[in-house]
Image: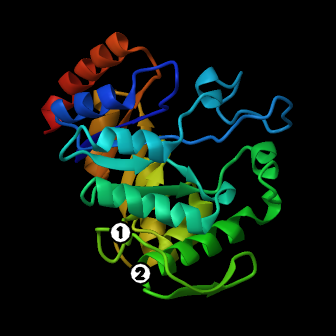
Amino acid sequence: MKFGISTFVTDQGVTPTVLGPAVEERGFDSLFIAEHTHIPVERRTPYPFGGEMPEKYYRTLDPFVALTAAAVVTERLLLGTGITLVVQRDPIITAKEVASLDLVSGGRAIFGVGVGWLREEIENHGTDPAVRGRLVNERLRAIRELWTKEKAEFHGEFVDFDPVYSWPKPVQRPHPPIYVGGGEAAFPRIAELGDAWIANVMPPEELRRRMERLHGMAHRDVTVTMAYTPADPELLEGFRKVGVDRVLLNLETMPERESLAQLDRFSAVTARFR
């Protein structure tokens, strides 16, 4: 089982140029960072984890800028979005951003995607939240065309363009892996378009049952990455036993000194699993 870090990179926490090397030096294989373009002041949508929404949601850096900054000061670290809100993004621009990150990093990009949960944020991008699942699927199909075809074109319900040239192409072939976040509603998307499932933390036995359902739907093994996971040895051992491929430990957004100290504690916990 591999270990990485998932976090919110903001203007108040450790910078990506410090965080990236620190994560790599401690033996973690990946860094996944969150995205929110903005947070509406007035919201009907409740924060899904209860209570008040933490300030880090308001202050996230653009994930592709932050990951590029981490890329140029690391050598092996995988650089993932956890997750890209595809529902809020133009697919042609997003295809170029992911391919550019893959190029400047030497083929280390992971495209983590999801449909989003904050309806007012989605609406501010001109999208009806009721159709966000169909929209995300179509944009992902269009992005794959842009990555893999010299003359790409797409004609769908939401995305429509005649043949275009779009460069650079990703270094990874056929394209960077697509990790799909979400619950069981995301399983059809994973089966058609995904290379891995980014799962939220749950009891290992429940995860095992869901993994079986996912594999049955996809008709293939799909690797599982657990996002924003506490550094609980018992929980980590449970995930190892049910066949989780990677655990992303939850690094809270903190200044540099506190962040490095937390990474040291994470490294001590995970040493027994390596």
Name the spot of residue 3 as percent of width and height, x first: 26, 41
- Residue drawn at x 52%, y 49% as measured from the top left: 83
How crowded pointer 1 is (Cα within 10 Å; few <14, some 14-19, many 20+) is rated as: many
Name the spot of residue 272 as percent of width and height, x first: 14, 31
What is the total number of numbered labels drawn onto the structure image? 2
Quadrant showing the C terminus = top left
Left or right for 141, reference 29: right
Left or right for 37, reference 256: right
What numbered label is drawn on residue 208?
none
Left or right for 186, reference 9: right
Q: Which residue in the rendered view is the most extreme toward the top?
A: 257
- Residue drawn at x 46%, y 20% as measured from the top left: 13
The quadrant in which residue 168 appears is bottom left
Most foreground residue, 119 or 16 = 16
- Residue drawn at x 47%, y 22% as measured from the top left: 253
Most foreground residue, 6 or 20 = 20
What numbered label is drawn on residue 148?
2
Choose the circle earlier in sequence order: 1 or 2: 2
The kind of residue tagged 2 is: Thr
Where disc 2 sits, the SS reads helix
Q: Is residue 85 above or below residue 261?
A: below
Q: Is residue 131 visible?
A: yes
Most foreground residue, 138 or 228 = 138
Where disc 1 sits, the SS reads loop
Residue carrying label 1: 170
How crowded pointer 2 is (Cα within 10 Å; few <14, some 14-19, many 20+) is rated as: some
The quadrant in which residue 228 appears is top left
- Residue drawn at x 37%, y 45% as measured from the top left: 68
Name the spot of residue 36 as percent of width and height, x first: 62, 40
Most foreground residue, 131 or 74 = 74
The kind of residue tagged 1 is: Pro
